[in-house]
Amino acid sequence: MKSVPSKFLEPVNAYLEGLVHPLAREDRRMLLSQRNFIAARLFAGIAAIAVLPIHLALFGAPSALEIVGYAWFTLPLVLVWQLSRTGNFERAHILSAVIFAVIVGVIAAATGGGKSFILPWLVVIPFEPALHASRRTALAATALAAMTAAVVALLDVLNLLPEPVHLPAAFVDPRLFSVLSATLYMGMIALGAGGREASDPVANERNRLIAENVREVVTCHGRNGAVNFVSPAAEKLLGIPASELMSHAFFDRVHIADRPVFLTAIAETAAKGKPSAIEYRLRRGPLEGPHKAAPPSYIWVETRYRAQGQQVVGVTTDISRRKSDETAIEAAQIEAMRANETKSRFLATVSHELRTPLNAIIGFSEMLTGEQATMIGAEHRDDYARLIRESGEHLLSVVNSILDVAQIDTGHFTIAPAAFFAGEMIESCREMMALRAEQAGIALSVELAPDLPEIVADERAVRQITLNLLSNAIKFTERGGTIAVTGGMEGNNFALTVADSGIGISESDLKQIGNPFFQASSSYNRPYEGTGLGLSVVKGLIDLHGGRLRIESRLGEGTKVTVLLPLVCKAMPAKTPSKIETFPIAFGGLDAKSEAKNELQRAKRRA
């Protein structure tokens, strides 16, 4: 059964704790400190208000000095209101020290200066902040008390003080009463702090056990980020003893790009008292030692901060796996977007390249096999047959390019290196493309370095590289242009260069050259036909030989493509097979006969 005092004190304590700011109630230590601060000032203010009517009844109107004394006891009520509304304990202590210092100084000046009975109360001013507030606040209160005593002493020495007020006779000497009352007041404050500390060991031990046994790292920071406590879990997280993370050593491990966010979060949490959370990178392992030259290893962590009195407590969790998953998801999204763009390019290019020759084949076939076939002259039948053949060869070229790209991408394209003379192969390719270049009105020249050595590579693949580059150069060079093919040595590599004076490639498109199905213009009405697979095949074949591809170009000024192959090529390991996506191709647009007629007209214009 509870005692009568306990029953009386419970609602009082509940009322006082209700006046404490909500953010301070979450910390038991801060709750007790603010409750004791409020209780002392509330009791003094209520006592002054209660005594005032009695004083008026017994002694009449108070004197000026008595009014100052009553103000001394009632002004702290303003502090109670301010602290309850804002929860700023530091500001409340500073304002309390200012009020005490001003009132003590005024009373001391009016009652004898350096001999005033009130001067012992100056000791009380820094006493309470020293127990409950920060060191900075205690120093400020001490400075106020010292400054008040110095001002009173200086005025006393300079005889600038007014005539001392004579106090009425009392049973106890005012000086003794002042010393006793100040001593009792400080004793009450000390008892409040002692009660708080008495209750802290259990809470501290509980908090210590929690901090030492959770997987998260618990840290306590000052306002400047300095650490004064680190839980043992830090050793598992960062690979070093927790003792090596004290003071600013923890901050030194924060990634340099994340340090502003780290300090801002701590400062704002301490100033505003609101919880916050940030994600940043921490360095693992020792900062110095035999592995100092190795690249630093960072992990992603998340820290949740909460203000606890004059400190900020952080709970840090390793989120490296989550970040890795987010990176993988982001990469998958980018890959999905790239696949979608590839599909769009595939539909925009391959469907056009297949539809046009197929329409020509179907249209001319109908003309040769229909009822009107007997009315077609021999010359026209030859033209139709030739166009059917050309369209079929174009279809075969498109299909072969798609198959080559698919085989290279999945790692099924194998090469068989063997020794051969590159010069002879280049001359053979020139002869094959000479007629096409002549028909296009383009000058094709070849220049080979003397004594060009044999190279060990897949001759069929190198021939395909050369033919693809020549075909591209002819396609994108206007009539009257030039194409120069050179073969020689560049360092320890065989260098094959195809330079043309064609339309060139813009800087933005140059970055994407070599991607499958990419062309500088990917619309159905582009001026140059092709699937955009030529350079993709070239790049894949070069990679299989362990070589390099270099492209130099400027829009309107031509293109220079250089292939660098080792003199002795070794088949590179095949890539991991990847899934091949297939898309249905819709054949629409012009009917077959109309397309065939258009193709015939284009052929006549070319002739």
Image: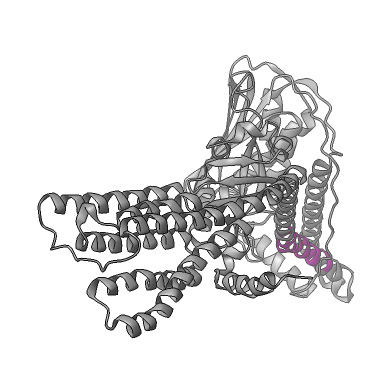
Q: Which residues are magenta?
A: 342-362
In the picture, measured across the screen, residue 489 lies left or right of residue 143, that is right
What residue is drawn where x is 59% and y is 46%?
220
Q: Nearer the viewer, residue 451 or 223?
A: 223
Q: Position of residue 201 (x, y in %)?
A: 68, 47
Judge whether residue 351 is colored magenta: yes
Q: Nearer the viewer, residue 409 or 95?
A: 95
In which quarter of the view is residue 436 placed? Answer: top right
Task: Farthest residue to the front: give it.
Answer: 171
Q: Position of residue 149 (x, y in %)?
A: 26, 51
Judge whether residue 165 is colored magenta: no
Q: Nearer the viewer, residue 254 or 431?
A: 254
What residue is drawn where x is 45% and y is 73%?
81
Q: Position of residue 388 (x, y in %)?
A: 81, 59
In the picture, measured across the screen, residue 17 lies left or right of residue 69, that is right
Asked whether residue 481 appears in the rendered view, the answer is no
Q: Position of residue 353 (x, y in %)?
A: 74, 60
In the picture, measured across the screen, residue 408 lies left or right of residue 100, that is right
- Quick check: 523 above or below 195? below
Asked whether residue 433 appears in the rendered view, the answer is yes
In which quarter of the view is residue 329 placed? Answer: bottom right
Q: Main secondary structure of the magenta part?
A: helix
Task: Farthest residue to the top: give it.
Answer: 451
Q: Nearer the viewer, residue 223 or 290?
A: 223
Where, quadrant-wise, is the N terminus in this rendering?
bottom right
> How is colour applied across the structure in the image?
one colour
In which quarter of the view is residue 182 placed? Answer: bottom left
